[in-house]
Structures are given as C-alpha cells and as structure tokens.
Amino acid sequence: MNLSQCEKECEVKVIKLHAKGALKDRLISFGLMKGADIKVLAHAPAKSTIEIIIARTRLALRREEAELIEVAK
Amino acid sequence: MTEDCVACPVMANHIRVALVGQPNVGKSMLINSVSNAHLHVGNFSGVTVDKTEVLFDYEDYHFTVVDLPGSYALNDYSIEEKVTSTFLFNGDFDIIVNVVDSTNLEKNMQLTAELMSMNKKMVMALNMSDEAEKEGIDIDEAYLSKLLGINCTKVSAVTRLGIDELIKSVISTFEQDKTSGKLVFSEAIEEEIDNVVSLLNTHKYQAPNSYRNVAINILKDNKRTYERMIANPIWTEVQPVLLEAKRHIELHHDTDDVKEAFAEEYASFNRGVVAEILNDTPLSEKRTMTEKIDSILINQYFGIPIFLFFMWSLFQLTFELGAIPMDMIDGFFGWLGDVVGATISNDDIRSLIVDGLIGGVGAVVLFVPNIIILFIGIALLESTGYMSRVAFLLDGFFHKFGLHGQSFIPLVTGFGCSIPAYMSARILKNDRDRLLTLFIIGFMSCGARLPVYVLFAGAFFSEEMAGNILFLIYISGAIIGLFAAKLLKLTAFKGEDEPFVMEMPKYRLPSLKLVWHTVSNKTWMYLKKAGTFIAAAAMLVWFMSNYPKNLELNSQFESKISALSSQKEITLVENKWAEQRLEQSYLGEVGKFIAPVFEPIGLDWKMSVSILTGLAAKEVVVSTLGVLYSLGDAVDEESSSLKALLASQISFASAMAFIVIIMIYLPCLAASIVFTREAGHIKYFFYLLGFTSIAAYILAFITYQVALLF
C-alpha cells in the first residue's frame, strides 16, 4: 500500500520510493528512505495534505506525493 | 601590539567562515549572539541578498562569517539551496561551521555527512542545547568530536551558552593543518572511491577540492563536478571506471539510484554515531506540547477558521491599537510645523518646509504605530512555527488555484513588504510556481499601503467599522490574488505542479530579542525612507504644485479679497484662489492631462496624481494627498484634517475605486526592481505592469459603478 492510504495514528515502514529525480532527493534528505519508520499524525481538510513524523522530524506531504511512497505495516 | 596589527597584512589573521546548516536550526539567532557579543555587523543586502556577511574581531583574528541559506542537502533543490551549494563548491572560505539542532541530531547530520565529504576544515555547533537538555537529550560532545573527527561544541544562541568556546574551537581548527572529518563509507563504496581517486592522481586533475571529494561528487552524479570534468580530456578514462563503479554500488545497495545509495550510507553512518553518543530518554508516551497545540491549530475542521480569526484580530489590533498614538504624532507634526514656520520669514521657503517637508513626512510617520503592530504580527507568525501549519492547511485550497502551499509564506510576508516577499519566493523550486507566486505577491497589500487604507477607512467609515474594513481590504486583495493566480496558471504558467514536501517545525516561543530585532529593523527602514526618499518626493510634489507662479491670478485675487470685509467671504475666496493656483501648477497640468484616463473610475486629478506618485513608493500616495488637499484648502491644518478633507471632497464611490487601484496596481519602484531581478528577465516586469494595470482598472471601474448604486 502507499502512504496516502494510511489512517491517522498509523505506523508504517517505507518499502520503496517511487518518486523520481529532485523529489526523490528531497524526500531522502528529510530521512524518508527505504527502511524508515513513519507515523501519520494528521490530515488537512479533504485529506489533501498529510502530516507524518519520521524520527523526530515532522513533515507535510501532498496526497500526490504520499502516493509515491510504498509502505507496509 | 595594536600598531603591529595595523601594519600587518589583514589576511594573516583573517578567518573566512561559512555558516551552514539545515533550515530552522537557529543560524541567524546564533550569528546575532556572536556578533552582538563583539558588535560590528555589516549587512550587505542588496549586493548579494541571498547570503549575509557578518564581520567581527576576536582576539587577534578578523572573522568574516558568511551566513548561507538553510539547506537540507547539497542537491540544489531550491534556488536558496543552490546559493549554498555553489558557495561551498567554489571553496572560497577557510572553515565550515555546521550548525545543527541538538534536538534532531540524526536528521541534521545528513547534511553534516555531506559537508564532511568535502574534506574542508570544519567545526560543529550543537545549537539549542538548552532545549535538548529540557527534552532529556544528553549528547556526549567529546565522544561525538572523536567519532566524527571534527570539533563539536554545545551552544545555545538563546542563552548565549558556549559562544566563546565555539569561536575558540574555530580558531584552533583553523590553526591546524589537516582537514576535519572522517566519514567512512561501507567497503564497497570506499573501494570505488579509491579507484577514482587513483585515476585522478595519475592524471594530476585540477580541482578546487580534494580528490576524495571529487570522487564522491562524481559518483553521486553531482552536476557541477560532472560539468567540470566532462570538459577535461581525463573524462574518456574516468567514464568507464565510473559506470562500472556505479553499477557495483547500485548492486550492493539493491537500488537503481546511486544517490539513494549514498543517502543510505550517510544515514546508517549517522544512526551509528547518534546511537553511540546520545543518552536519549525515550520519547515518553504522553503527547508533546507541539502535538497538543497541533491537535487544535491544524484540526481538520477548526484549523482554517482559527487562522482567519488570527488574521482578523491582527488587522483589528493594527487599526484600534495603532490609532491611539496617532493623535499625538499628528499633534507633534502640527506643532513642529507651527514652530518652524514661525522662524521662517520667506513665504515660499516656509511653505516648502511646513507644507512640503513636514506635512509630507508627517503624513507618513503618522502610520508608524500601525506598521509596528503589523510587523510584530508577521514576526510572530514567522517565528512561532505557525506559518508552516497554515501552509499545511491551505495547500489543498491553494493547489486548486494553481498555487503551492508554500507560496503562502512569501504571500504573508508580502503583507509586510513586497521586497522580502519576492526574495522568499525562492523557497519554491519550480520556476513556473515561483514566477506565478511573484506575480501574485503584489496583491497582498504591503505595509506601505496600510496608511492609505487607514486614512480612507477612517474617513469613510465609522470607527467601529474601520478595523473590519481594513480586514476586508486585505482579504479581498488576497482573494483577487487567488483568482489572478488561477487565471495565470490556466494561461501563462501552464504545466506540472511542484511537489509539496515541507518540514513542520516544533512550536517555539518566539524569542523577544529576535522579534524586537526584526520589528525595530523594519520600522527603522520605514522611518529612514520617510526621512530621505519620501521627504524628497514630498518636496518635489510641493514644488510641482506651487509653480509656476501666476502673478496675474494672484493680483486678481488679492484685489478681490481686499474689496471684501466679512471673514467668511474672504475664506471662501481664498479657497477658490488656492484651488485655481493648484490647477494651473505643473502638477495640475499633469493631473489634467491624465485625468481623462481616470475619469471613468471616478477619480479627480488630485487622486490621479497621487496614484502616479505612488509608483515611486506607496507612502508617497498619502503625502501627495496631504500636500494637494491641504494646499487646495486655505484653512490651517489641524489634527485629522486630511481625513476630514478627504471625506468632504471625495465621493464614497470614488474613494472605493481609489482603494481598489491602490490594492492592485504596480508595487513601488524598489519592489519592482527586486521583482524583475527575482523573475530573471525585464520582460516579466512589463507583463506585471500590464497585468496589474489592466486588472486594477477593470476592478476599479466595477467597484465605482457598483458603489454609485448605493
């Protein structure tokens, strides 16, 4: 499944990044890489944006970006 | 000793420091603590707006600290990050000071690892160590120094802890010969690095950095290293080695992306180091303060209403609280005018000083309290961490209009001043999104337009309503901006959307010092502008509205007045005289020349002229109105007279159309210059000019026609 399908409070592990190029570099520089543990913290109205925490970093991602992150429980 | 120093070459003890860190680690705060301790700050903005240089002396050393924009990594994601990586790549410095957030070491060290691979002298400043201590994070910095091979010092920019130690550590590292850092990769990668290095060695390749650094960069597909090398004959030999090396690394890391492999290497190195040096009491189960606050502020349902409420309160405060000292300031300038006027016998010079200079500058200074409140509000928004929450909340909404959630940050900055707003649009990576944001920033009414609104809201609405009107003006400006964005996105800036990935910082109590610093700085700039640019403009406006002298007209009226006896009649004639004098002045001629253009939207020639002069700076609008309307009226100036004059001479519909024009048309000269620079081509300036003028005119026309119905 991908990150956008996760509900609030759900804890998952990153399996693979399907993002490309600059976006992928960006995600990696935030620590969002294979094997990282993340937890979903909140959703913006209409679930357009999601907030996650990874290690001690809080990140906001748009749904389109979250869809590119393959995760597993 | 001091004489020795004057004689000795400056370079001898000159240390050039590159201050590097991820965003939001308190770098600016740290540089303030350091430079305040030794004074002498030079802010070279305007030349290189992107990086700030701070100079100071410590013991026998001259320091030049270059404060580079915060970067998550050296991969040129945004323009700001490009500034940082270009500077580091060119290597024109002696030592790196890597500032890290002690409460989030692992993430921060991702950049540290990249910096270490540059093989430069380097020290680490473990900032926010007071905060880390409170959170139960205990860092063994001696052990960390040993593991990384770089000097690590615990500091706190807020409590000024460890600042001296940091400077001393910079000096001692500077005095050592060897470079710092011993970042070791996994065997597979080290092997490939060695291969490339030995190849470079045999060919004596010319590079600003070490071979190891070049090897790592080229393996990581660093564009600049690549471009430099591809131009060199050596490339034909490097290329096959490189291809083989990458294949090897990718295989080893089970990925098809060598950059990802390196990132994983860095991350596992960091994880290892952090596990060794950190005595971290595990995050307790109870929710942190940030989470508690977030559960309210970014609540799916209440988040946006809460935000709107905050903005509304800000504008209410700006008006209500700002109105209190206004009478005093107004009174002061009235008094000053009288006192100074009494000492000048020449009528022309007196009028120049009292009506032109004091009147014009006074009209602008009057609004300093409003400006201060607005700036405090924006500074609080920026420094607490709330700004990114709003970006999070609004991204979905913004996205519908073709904007980016992070566009919100330059847009809100635009409420203060367009110039920093244009510059902060650099956080947007994608050029199209950035250009789009640049075009929209002007719709966010800047602080300099506030005086116009305060004046008109006060003149045409009751006191209770004025704050709401102010809020309404700002909000409708923003909404028009959104629609303009949509229009531009559908036409001029079609294309892919920029991804939205943003860090949400912890909430922090804003440091009073930092808020004071920002607000006092900006207020001082406003005052300085009032004293120089605005003063000159006001005098120019005065001159153009007083000359040429029409002696015939004067003698005509003088004889008319001498024939009259009742004071009331004299005042009436005097007003008429002033009115006619103004109309045949240079400015009157200009005004009448352009008046036909502005007639359909209900503006008289005085308002039209103010709009023209407002192109120089929006503050000039008020001072021009002040000069024009007070000259047209012979009664002496009293407090709030301009407000009263406007209310009596301008119709409601015209006033509304005027506000709309001010809201939308071209920002001031300085902002336009910065806009052009940030947009990257002069043609964009003409687009902006055309776009804003047409939009302003059409909307003002509609406003005028609608307002006439009431």
Image (tube, rainbow, N blue to C red):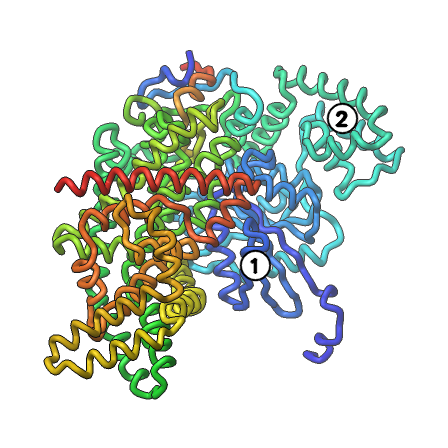
Q: Would you place residue B259 above or below residue B127 in this image?
A: above
Residue B424: x %, y % from top left: 47, 44
Estimate the spatial distance between the alpha carbons at disc 1 and disc 2, rounded to whole Å. 45 Å
Is label 1 on the same chain as label 2? yes
Q: Secondary structure at mark 1?
A: loop
Q: Is residue B55 left or right of residue B192?
A: left
Residue under label 1: B44
In the picture, measured across the screen, residue B663 lies left or right of residue B428, that is: left
Q: Name which quarter of the figure residue B536 lies in.
A: bottom left
| SS for callout 2 | helix
Q: Nearer the viewer, mark 1 or mark 2?
A: 1
The location of residue B146, given as percent across then percent down, is 63, 45
**Residue flagged by tag 2: what amino acid is it?**
Glu
Name the residue nearer the viewer: B3 or B670: B670
Residue at figure coordinates x 24%, y 56% from the top left: B454
Mark 1 surroundings within 10 Å by alpha-carbon count, few (fewer than 14), some (14 through 19), many (20 or more): few
Q: Position of residue B182 (x, y in %)?
A: 68, 40
- Say which residue label 2 marks: B191
